[in-house]
Amino acid sequence: MLMHLNSPLVGKNLSTRDETPIETLQEIPKQQMQVRCMQTSHLITIIKKSCKTTAQIHQVHAQAITRGLFSLHPTLLLTQILRFLAFSPSHPTDFPSNSAVSYPTKIFSLIPNPSTFNYNAVIRAHVLLYSPRSSLIFFTEMRRKSVSPDFHTFPFVLKACGLLQDSVLLAKNLHSELIKFGFLADVFVSNALACTYCRAGDVDGAKKVFERSLFRDVVSYNVMIDGFVKAGEIDKATELFDEMPERDAVSWGTLLAGYAKSNRCVEAIELFDCMVDLMVKFDNVALVSVLSACAQLGELAKGKKVHDLIERNGIKLDSYLGTALVDLYAKGGCIEMAMEVFKLCREKNVSLWNAMLMGLAMHGHGMLLLQYFSRMVENGVRPDGVTILAVLVGCSHSGLIDEARSIFADMESVYGVPRELKHYGCMADLLGRAGLIKEAREMIKEMPMGGSVCVGRITRRV
């Protein structure tokens, strides 16, 4: 038996305990430390059932070293730690990225003669920590040491490839490896390869993989539809969508987003109506896209129906849905409703703030806009170029010359936003409208190169 019957730990369900992993580990009486098999088994149980974050793994690892628990089965314990890092990583922003990347590397380096599973785990861990080059280095080492890859190796190697710029050549090399090992028969692997080609901008390469696949599932079609949409080939995406034997929410949402982004707004709305009629469960991507289409067409009534649908289904207003609704109501002339939606959104990212600020600007609420801008900064949301442009436009429409001057002067020094041609143009236009001809001309002279078109439009007024 791995654990003595009289052990106080027998019969306890670690997955439902309130104690932290460290407290659980410290329960092992010192006299039982001699029972190495029990120690190893118990530590693995802690890692599997009690650890939830990388910080807890660090603590358990340190305690295990202190208590000498690595002496009997170091490879087994290190493999379990590496497995945790690969399948249950903390978010990369929870700790410095260098530490996040170096920890799985260090664990892996301690494993003698790492297996295919070990390589798969460290490759996966680095991909999830947005360190694709490290993943590919481990894959290269794996091949150099003649450790055979399996079906689980390539999907994350391909994902690492897709995270890099100019990765078409690398994708083709991996494609050759997959043919060599005969792994393209696996639909998960072939989907990953097609996705990599799409991310690299080679939709034709993805299409060849798709057409040669022996097995296709809904993901296979979704990958290609997304690839066609991003390549601007909406008609091909539509054709493939119509050929699908079955569709999921991603299929509908991807094509709908493609229509909206390509200004095919009528088709976007019609596709959404079809979703509703067929009782297809829509996701936030579809909702944001149809709201965007309604805003572009000025279809406020239709947008309100979508909003009602959101409320009836109890869908939480995240920052993306909130942005789409604020934009809809602001463009539709309902600035009060836009403000109400903005107030209801608990998550407010910079895009949501920008939509609200631009709405206030276009409706001539300059002073209120400045109040919202102050709240944005106070809440720790960093402005970007769109934010400052919205503020300057609002000041221009409301004749707030001094306020605009102050914001423009503080752009780089206070807000860390570099001045662009559009900001200079907005300021010159504002000054020209106010009759401050000399100051407007000085602003034009300060414009970066490339402002000739803007200057021609502005100088007709100044």
Image: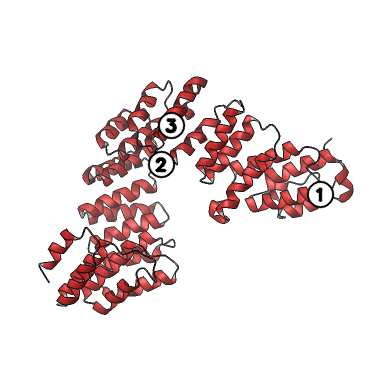
* 255 over 387 or under it: above or below: above
Q: How many marks?
A: 3
Q: Which residue is mark 1?
A: 67
Q: Amino acid at mark 3?
A: Ala
C-alpha gap between disc 1 and disc 2: 46 Å
Q: Nearer the viewer, mark 1 or mark 2?
A: 2
Residue 389 is situated, as x and y percent measured from the top left of the image, at: 28, 65
Q: Is residue 156 above or below residue 7?
A: above
Q: Using the numbered discs, state the Cα–Cα distance from disc 2 to disc 3 in whole angstroms.
A: 11 Å
Question: Which one is in front, 32 or 248?
Answer: 32
Q: Give the structural element (helix, strand or loop) at label 3.
A: helix
**Depicted 337 relative to depicted 433: above or below:** above
- Residue at 67% x, 52% y is 56
Is 185 positioned to the left or the right of 36 in the image?
left
Mark 3 closeness class: few <14, some 14–19, many ≥20 residues within 10 Å: many
Name the quadrant of the N terminus: top right
Instruction: For mark 1, give the secondary structure.
Output: loop
Judge from the rendering whether residue 110 lies leftward or rightward of residue 277; answer left or right.
Answer: right
Residue that appears at 28% across and 75% down: 405
- Measured as percent of width and height from the top left, residue 94 is found at 57, 56
Q: Quadrant of residue 455?
A: bottom left
Name the disc covering residue 171, or none: 3
- In this view of the protein, which residue sits in the foreground, 23 or 395? 395
Query: Which residue is at the front of the view, 401 or 42?
Result: 401
The mark nearer the N terminus, 1 or 2, is 1
Residue 352 relative to residue 142: left or right: left
Q: Is residue 114 visible?
A: yes
Residue 311 seen anywhere in this rendered image of the structure: no
